[in-house]
Image: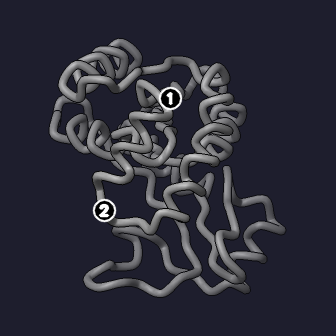
């Protein structure tokens, strides 16, 4: 039976980069949790690979049947969520299931699974450094960056709810630290 590893972090903290480096270790048997969404597939996305694509109506029906570990309506009729059954299926195959979720979703999944899950919070060294990284990406308008900083301030206040906190002030060091934490948990 696979284990469950939850990653949460403010935008710009390096979480995705750290997770992608961990995924390059086949001996860890890591697999992303495949989420559900009510949006249309983009580009080469395939149902059951990147996401399970369902209608907003079906998403609401599944919410009513309590089939989700966590979900969010990001915009009107644009849902994202994690199905309990999908996680169980992946874990039963012996996969160590990786969740890349927001802080609220991370806390919900941890609460549901308790000790079967490990929650890791990737923290930037400071809000100033986070602002510098987000600005350096050059992908967001200044007002979007400010919204992300505001959200990050809240998310940082939730870090203590996680099992482990990794401060990403040096990417290679943060990857190595995270790798050791994950190895310890799954052995």
Here the colouring is one colour
Location of residue 172 (image quadrant): top left
Q: Secondary structure at mark 1?
A: strand
Which of the two labelled residues, at mark 2 and mark 1, occupies the earlier sequence position? 1
Location of residue 61 (image quadrant): bottom right
Q: Do callouts 2 and 1 mark residues in contact (Cβ within 8 Å)?
A: no
Q: Quadrant of the C terminus?
A: top left
* Residue 113 appears left or right of 23: right
Mark 2 → mark 1, Cα distance in angstroms: 24 Å
Q: Position of residue 128 (x, y in %)?
A: 45, 34
Q: Is residue 182 visible?
A: yes
The mark lying in front, picked from 2 and 1, is 2
Q: Quadrant of the N terminus?
A: top left
Q: Position of residue 163 (x, y in %)?
A: 56, 18
Name which residue lies at 76% across and 76% down: 60
* Residue count near mark 2 (Cα–Cα under 10 Å), binned few <14, some 14–19, many ≥20: few
Q: Secondary structure at mark 2?
A: loop
Checking the image for residue 140, the label placed there is: none
**Front-most of residues 64 and 148:** 148
* Residue 21 appears left or right of 37: left
Q: Which residue is mark 1?
A: 121
* Residue count near mark 1 (Cα–Cα under 10 Å), binned few <14, some 14–19, many ≥20: many
């Amino acid at each position: 039976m696979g284990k469950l590893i939850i990653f949460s972090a403010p935008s710009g903290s390096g979480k995705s980069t750290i997770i992608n480096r961990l995924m390059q270790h086949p001996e860890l048997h890591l697999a992303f949790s495949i989420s559900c969404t009510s949006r249309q597939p983009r580009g080469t996305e395939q149902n059951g690979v990147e996401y399970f694509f369902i209608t907003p109506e079906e998403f609401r029906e599944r919410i009513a049947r309590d089939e989700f570990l966590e979900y969010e309506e990001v915009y009107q009729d644009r849902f994202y969520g994690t199905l309990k059954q999908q996680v169980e299926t992946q874990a039963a195959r012996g996969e160590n299931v990786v969740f890349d979720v927001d802080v609220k979703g991370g806390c919900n999944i941890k609460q549901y699974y308790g000790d079967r899950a490990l929650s890791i919070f990737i923290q930037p060294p400071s809000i100033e450094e986070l602002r510098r990284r987000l600005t350096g990406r050059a992908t967001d308008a200044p007002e979007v960056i400010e919204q992300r900083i505001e959200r990050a301030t809240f998310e940082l206040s939730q870090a203590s709810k996680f099992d482990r906190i990794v401060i990403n002030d040096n990417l290679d060091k943060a990857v190595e630290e995270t790798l050791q934490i994950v190895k310890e948990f799954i052995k």
